[in-house]
Image (tube, rainbow, N blue to C red):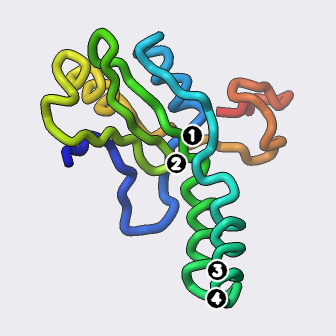
Amino acid sequence: MVFWGVLVRSERPLVGCFCTVALVHELREAFGTDFECDGADLLAGHGDRTARTAAGLGIRPDSPVVLCAARNEVQFGPRHAFRLRVGPGAFVSGTLDRYSVRVECERDADFPEPARGRFLAFLSSLQMGGVWDWTGCSPDAAPGTSLGDDTAVR
C-alpha cells in the first residue's frame, strides 16, 4: 500500500483543521473535471450505527467502542470520498476530512506522473488560515465589515 497525503498534526487536540467545504471547492478549482466528489459524508451516522450494532451484541452504550465511534463522527466528520483522474479512464481514490487528505494505492505505478505531481503540489499549497479578531461584533459579520468606527472585522 502506498500513501500520499497531508495530515494536520499537533501535540494539542483540535489546534487546526481543514474546512471540508472549502477543501472540496479548492480541489474542484485545481483539478476541474479530473476531480469527482459526490459530497456524501462517510461518517454520517457512524456513532448511531455502532451503538445499534453494539446493543445487538450486548455491549453497553457507554463502552469505549461506542463512545469512540460517536466522538470520531463529530471530531473528524464530514469525511468525503473522492476520485482523481490520473489518465484516460484511470482514477485513484482518496478521502478527505477535517484532519487529512489522502490517496492510497496498491502500487506506486497506480498514481503516475504528472497527476501525482499535481496532487502533491496542491497538498503543498495548503496553509492554515489567518487569525481573525471578532471582538466587539457578531461572529456572523463578514471580514472587512465596518463596525461604525475605526474598527473593521479582520
Closer to us: mark 2 or mark 4? 4
Q: Amino acid at mark 4?
A: Ile
Residue 98: mark in rendering? 2
Q: Which residue is mark 4?
A: 59
How far apart are labels 2 and 3 at the CA level? 26 Å
Tell me residue 128's x, y (percent). 44, 40
Query: Seen in the image, is 103 located left or right of residue 96?
Result: left
Q: Are marks 3 and 4 in contact (CB under 8 Å)?
A: yes
Nearer the N terminus, badge 3 or badge 4? 3
Query: Seen in the image, is 151 located left or right of residue 81?
Result: right
Q: Which residue is mark 3?
A: 54
Closer to us: mark 4 or mark 1? 4
Q: Amino acid at mark 3?
A: Ala
Nearer the N terminus, badge 4 or badge 1? 1
Q: Are marks 4 and 1 in contact (CB under 8 Å)?
A: no
How far apart are labels 4 and 1 at the CA level? 34 Å
- In front: 132, or 60? 60
| Within-10-Å neighbours for mark 3: few <14, some 14–19, many 20+ | some
Q: Which residue is mark 1?
A: 19
Label 2 sits on a secondary structure element that is loop
Nearer the N terminus, badge 2 or badge 3? 3
Q: Amino acid at mark 2?
A: Arg
Which residue shows up at 83% across the image and 42% down it? 138
Label 4 sits on a secondary structure element that is loop
Nearer the N terminus, badge 2 or badge 4? 4
Tell me residue 17's x, y (percent). 50, 49
How far apart are labels 2 and 4 at the CA level? 29 Å
Q: Quadrant of residue 101?
A: top left
Closer to us: mark 2 or mark 3? 3
Q: What residue occupies the far front of the structure in this picture?
A: 56
